[in-house]
Image (cartoon, helix red, strand yellow):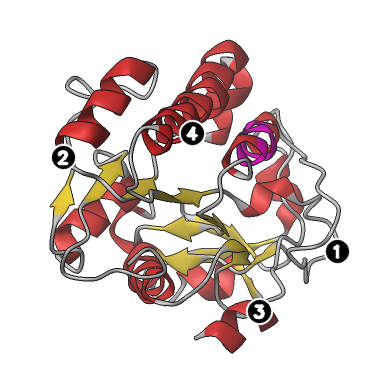
Amino acid sequence: MIAGVCLKDNILLLGGSGTLGKAIIKSKLFKKLKYPSKKKLNILNQAKIENFIKKNNINIILHCAALARVKECEKNKKKAFKVNVIGTKNVVNAVLNCSKFSKQKIKILFISSDGVYPSTKGNYKETDKLKSYNYYGLTKIKAEKFVRKLKYFIIIRTRFFDKKKIKFKYSATNIFTSSLEVNKLVNYIYKIQKKNFNGILNIGRNKISDYDNYKKYIKNIKPCDRKKIFSQVNFKLAIDASLNLNKFKKIL
C-alpha cells in the first residue's frame, strides 16, 4: 500500500532532531517509524541513504531534514544550499536507485515552506507562481524540483511553531500567515498520508496575524506594527504569507 499508511509500512524519518521531527516521534502516530540520528544517517551521504532504505525495506520517507532558520540561511548560503538542495537531491536519487532494483514503491513526504511564495498578498494557491523572498525559500523551491521527479510524493507547503518556544516579547498585528502549532501539523501530516493523495498541498490554518496567533500561548506578548519587527532584522520577512486551503480542506 503506497497511497496511505498501513501497518506494514516501514517509515523513515529524516530530521528527527528538529522541531517537527521531535513532534512526530513524540506523537507515536507512525507505528513503524525509524529515526536514525544525523550522525548515523546524513542526507549528504547518498550511499548510506540507499543502504538504509534497502536494509530496512523502507517505503515511506518523511523528509523534514533542513537548515530552516532564515537568519542562518542568509548568513551561510553555501551551507543552506548544501543541506536543503543537495541533501534533498541525494534522498531523491537514493529513492530512484532503490526503485530501479526493487518492486518496492517508495513515497516521499517532503516538508517545504510557505516561503516559496512571494508572501505579500496572501491566499496563495498551490498552482501560483513561486517566487521566494529569502534564501531559505529559494532552497525549498530548488529542492521541490527534485522531489517532483518522483512518481510518488507529497510536497507540503506550510509554516509551524512550537508553543513552548515562543521567546519574543512583541508580535505584529499586520503580518499574516497560516502558521500552525507543530502538534497540529503532525496530526494533519498523519491524516494526509493515510489518504490517496499525490502532489503538492498547502497545510495550515485560516489567515491570522502573528499577534493573534501567539497571544493564545503567551499572555504578556505585546502587539506592534510590522515595521518594528522588520527594523530588527537585515533580511526580508513575510507581509502576508497566508495560504489558500481549499484543496487541503477538500481532502480532509
Q: CA distance from mark 1 to mark 4?
A: 32 Å
Q: Earlier in the sequence, mark 2 or mark 1?
A: 2
Would you say the residues marked 2 and 1 are in contact, meaning their CB atoms lie under 8 Å apart? no
Residue 107: % across, % down: 42, 52
Q: Which residue is mark 4?
A: 92
| Residue at 55% from the left image edge and 83% from the top image edge | 251
Q: Residue 99's image quarter?
A: top left
Left or right side of 175 for 63: left
Type of amino acid under label 1: Lys
Q: Residues within 10 Å of mark 1 (few under 14, many from 20)?
A: few
- The label nearer to you, 2 versus 1, is 2
- The label nearer to you, 2 versus 3, is 2
Q: CA distance from mark 1 to mark 3?
A: 19 Å
- The label nearer to you, 1 versus 3, is 3
Q: Which residue is mark 1?
A: 121
Q: Earlier in the sequence, mark 4 or mark 3?
A: 4
Q: Is residue 26 above or below residue 147?
A: below
Q: Quick check: can you spot residue 241?
A: yes
Type of amino acid under label 2: Asn
Q: Which residue is mark 3?
A: 247
Q: CA distance from mark 4 to mark 3?
A: 25 Å
